[in-house]
Image (cartoon, rainbow, N blue to C red):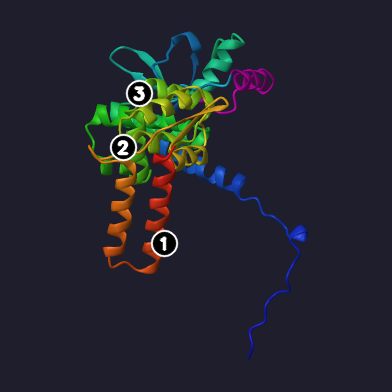
Amino acid sequence: MAKKFAARVAKSDRRVIDMSDRLSRDLFKISDEKLLKGARLDEILLKDINVKEQVRTKFNDDSIKELAANIKVNGLIQPLVLHLDKKLGKYTLICGERRFRAMSSINMEKCPCFILEDKTEEELMAIQFSENSAREALHYIDKADGILNYQIATKASERKIQAALGISKSEVHRSLLIAKMDKKIKEAAKKYNIEKYVLLEFDVLDKSDFKTQLEKKILAGDVTKRSQLKRSLSSGVVKTGTKKKVTKAALPKGLSAAAFLKAMQAKQKDMNLDKETQKLLKALVQETKEIVDM
């Protein structure tokens, strides 16, 4: 018996089911249950809360103002998360710096807080990282710095970081590479919203005049997309205004451009290559000719 299929529906008539809201609520519920295990709820004076360096370093002022206006009307819906140092009797903010900043801007005196006790520094860092990553859009630079700080504090391997923070091993590895990049590059990435793969692919380039020129464009926010970087890499050109700077291919010492190309073409004929590889090699020789002829 032939299988029956539902009739095709025009794209304009298809019903879109948005799962994001339900997924977000479920994720937050799971995150909160793990995060707040053993916590107690209490009202704490804002002036008694110590705010240390957080995972998040990029804050949107307009977003803070909107949040402050909302809190002023509706109150604080999601309490802050604090850790109590029993020996010092001090509260340290673990999660909710945006909410803390918003409340401080409207001169709130106290707010509801979930209070954790007897947590290690490693546990607090993992909680802070997970909460920031899940609840609000965390910039990949802040995420990378947070992962590096966690590794420095715990001396954990990439695999252990993966297990503790709940992210993939490849993401841990890429984040650690980004975190160790020059501070100026990271600041430019946040300022101009540069794609993370621009930084990763730029970082592996060998030191050269071309890389120096490319770095200047990245720092100025002129190269923000991976596609822009790829075009520069494939052409060996860094656009500067209306002019173009071209990096010529370096030739072996004592070998002219014409002799080099002739040697490449001769070598190509001697190789026992399939048609596809021959085609690619021929294209490479042609591109090399165009560069050295400039």
Amino acid at dot 3: Asp
Dominant secondary structure (helix, strand or loop) of the stretch shown in magenta: helix
Tag 2: Cα neighbours inside 10 Å, few (<14), some, or many (≥20)? few
Question: What residue is shown with label 3?
Answer: 182
282 relative to 34, above or below: below
Magenta residues, start to end: 61-82
Camera-nearest label, 3 or 1 = 1
Which quarter of the figure has residue 77?
A: top right
Name the quadrant of the C terminus. Answer: top left
Measured Cα–Cα span from mark 3 to mark 1: 40 Å
Label 3 vs 1, first from the N-terminus: 3
As drawn, the label of residue 250 is: 2
Element type at mark 3? loop
Task: Tell me the residue at 59%/8% (across/down).
Answer: 107
State the SS at label 2: loop
Residue type pointed to by label 1: Lys
- Residue type at mark 2? Ala
Residue corresponding to mark 1: 279
Q: Pointer 1: residues within 10 angstroms few (<14), some, or many (20+)?
A: few
User: Could you tell me how far apart the alpha carbons at marks 2 and 1 are, in whole angstroms?
Assistant: 23 Å
Q: Earlier in the sequence, mark 3 or mark 2?
A: 3
Q: Secondary structure at mark 1?
A: helix
Establish if 138 lies above or below 268.
above
Q: Is residue 278 visible?
A: yes
Q: Depth check: give the residue in front, 39 or 23.
A: 23
* In magenta segment, residue 64: yes
x and y, in percent, of residue 239 in the image = 51, 30
Between marks 3 and 2 in the image, the one whose residue lies nearer the viewer: 2
